[in-house]
Each structure stands twice: as C-alpha cells, then as structure tokens.
Image (cartoon, grey):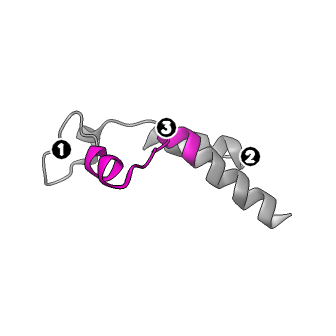
Amino acid sequence: WFDIAQVISTRMRFENNINKIDTQSLNLPAKRPIYSKLNCDKIKNDFNLKILDWETSLKSFLNKIIIEEN
C-alpha cells in the first residue's frame, strides 16, 4: 500500500509525507500473511485478457484523471 500511495502522491504532486510502517505496528486483530498476491490467471485465461502490472495501470488511470481535470 505504501508503494501505491507513493505513486499517487508523486503523480498528483501532493505535498505530504507518507511514512512506511509495518503491519505489526497496526495492532490488527487478525494475522496477516507476509506475502499475499491476487492470482489473476483464471480470468486472464478464460477471457484471453492481458492484465498490466499495477504501477502501469495506476499511472495510466492517474494520467486520465489529470487530463480530464484540465
């Protein structure tokens, strides 16, 4: 989530500080896996889709927002 927040903040030119924290410091009631990733293989194969990586998709989305604002 930190990486996503960083990309948004940089692209939108927000003037703020984003601090990275670890999950343990949040004191959440449920244990969280160290690494979890959404597996998109089935939808890619069933619908013959090419899914871009999150950073490329996010930057494209943000560019669209910026263009529509101006």
In reply to whether residue 52 is colored magenta, the answer given is yes
- Marks 3 and 2, how far apart at CA: 15 Å
Q: Which residues, given as a range, are shown in magenta? A: 38-57
Furthest-bottom residue in view?
69
Residue, disc 1? 32
Q: Residue at x 35, y 48 (%)?
A: 44
On screen, residue 51 versus residue 70, left or right, reads: left
Residue, disc 3? 3
Examine the rendering and report whether any part of residue 36 can be seen.
Answer: yes
Kind of residue indicated by mark 2? Arg
For this rendering, which residue is in front, 43 or 38?
43
Which element carries disc 1, helix, strand or loop?
Answer: loop
Residue, disc 2? 13
For this rendering, which residue is in front, 30 or 70?
70
On screen, residue 47 versus residue 29, left or right, reads: right
Kind of residue indicated by mark 3? Asp
